[in-house]
Image: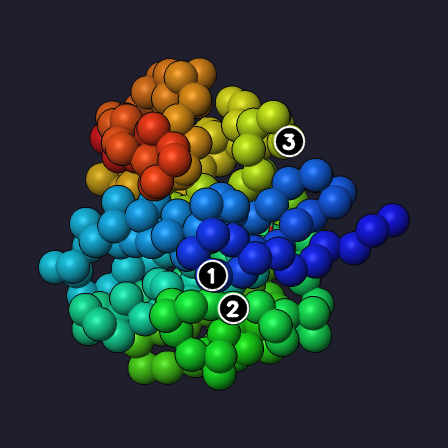
């Protein structure tokens, strides 16, 4: 079977194509542009007044969102404890030519990939990373999170990750007042999050995408 490989997106940043799902990890219109819009501007930017954020990402993938979060922590002097869930970790060796644009340094990027799985790695005073290899929603909750980046493949590739059980696991993982963000804008997903006790906003999406969703747990 063909292996996952690096592709270039329109803003010059890289993404990964996963033949197993026939899907790319990011928008082909610009991986970095999409990640910044959805996860940083509509997610982390709500937390500039916090001292510390417990952040959970479903789909660690290329680590691009984690890298952006690390540099956001430095820029805003806010500590982030990042947990990344990934069912199919990439081999760091294949990522040498992955372009992260101005999301951070190559050294930071490789530190995220080389950090040990299943333990907390304090890669800098303001950022720790804990990568967990598991299949969402098979997740043992140890704490509740302030912010969730929900970055699974799209509903047409992975419908089960957008159904009740997977979304319920997200909501259970959030503290009251916690935020969930995703590039997905599907009405059914929105309705399920509302029925599980969230207020949900449909926000403008990144370039070439009309909408995205952001939920806040009651
Ligand atoms: C859209 S990509 C995420 C991109 C990633 N956030 C990044 O910045 O590169 C989806 C990711 O979810 C992972 N994934 C797919 N199914 C999963 C599951 N059931 N549990 C955990 N991760 C899963 C994929 O391997 C892939 O890395």
**Dot in front, 2 or 3:** 2
Q: CA distance from mark 1 to mark 3?
A: 25 Å
160 horizontally vs 124: left or right: right
Q: In the structure shown, which secondary structural element does the residue marked by tag 2 occupy? A: loop
Q: Residues within 10 Å of mark 3 (few under 14, many from 20)?
A: few
Q: Which residue is mark 3?
A: 157
Seen at 51% across and 22% down, the residue is 164
**Image position, residue 59 (x, y; %):** 54, 50
Q: In the structure shown, which secondary structural element does the residue marked by tag 1 occupy? A: loop
Q: Specify whether residue 130 is in view.
A: no
Q: Which residue is mark 1?
A: 12
Seen at 22% across and 72% down, the residue is 75
Quadrant occupied by the C terminus: top left
Q: Residues within 10 Å of mark 2 (few under 14, many from 20)?
A: many
| Callout 2–callout 1 Cβ contact below 8 Å | yes
Q: Earlier in the sequence, mark 1 or mark 3?
A: 1
Q: CA distance from mark 2 to mark 3?
A: 25 Å
| Callout 1–callout 3 Cβ contact below 8 Å | no
**Dot in front, 1 or 3:** 1
Q: In the structure shown, which secondary structural element does the residue marked by tag 3 occupy? A: loop
Q: Specify whether residue 93 is in view.
A: yes
Q: Which residue is mark 2?
A: 99
Q: Earlier in the sequence, mark 2 or mark 1?
A: 1
**Dot in front, 2 or 1:** 1
**Image position, residue 101 (x, y; %):** 42, 68
């Amino acid at each position: 079977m063909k292996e996952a490989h690096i592709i270039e997106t329109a803003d010059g940043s890289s993404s990964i194509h996963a033949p197993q799902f026939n899907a790319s990890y990011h928008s082909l219109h610009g991986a970095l542009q999409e990640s910044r819009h959805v996860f940083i501007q509509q997610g982390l930017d709500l937390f500039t007044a916090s001292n510390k954020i417990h952040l959970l990402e479903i789909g660690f993938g290329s680590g691009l969102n984690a890298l952006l979060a690390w540099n956001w922590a430095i820029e805003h002097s806010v500590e982030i404890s990042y947990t990344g869930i990934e069912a199919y970790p990439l081999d760091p060796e294949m990522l040498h030519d992955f372009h992260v644009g101005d999301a951070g340094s190559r050294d930071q990027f490789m530190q995220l990939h080389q950090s040990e799985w299943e333990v907390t790695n304090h890669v800098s005073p303001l950022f720790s990373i804990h990568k967990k290899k598991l299949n969402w929603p098979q997740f043992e909750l140890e704490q509740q999170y302030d912010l969730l980046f929900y970055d699974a493949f799209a509903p047409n590739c992975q419908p089960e990750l957008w159904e009740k059980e997977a979304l319920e696991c997200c909501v259970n993982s959030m503290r009251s007042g916690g935020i969930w963000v995703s590039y997905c804008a599907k009405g059914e997903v929105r309705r399920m999050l509302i029925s599980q006790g969230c207020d949900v906003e449909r926000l403008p999406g990144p370039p070439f995408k009309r909408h995205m969703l952001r939920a806040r747990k009651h």
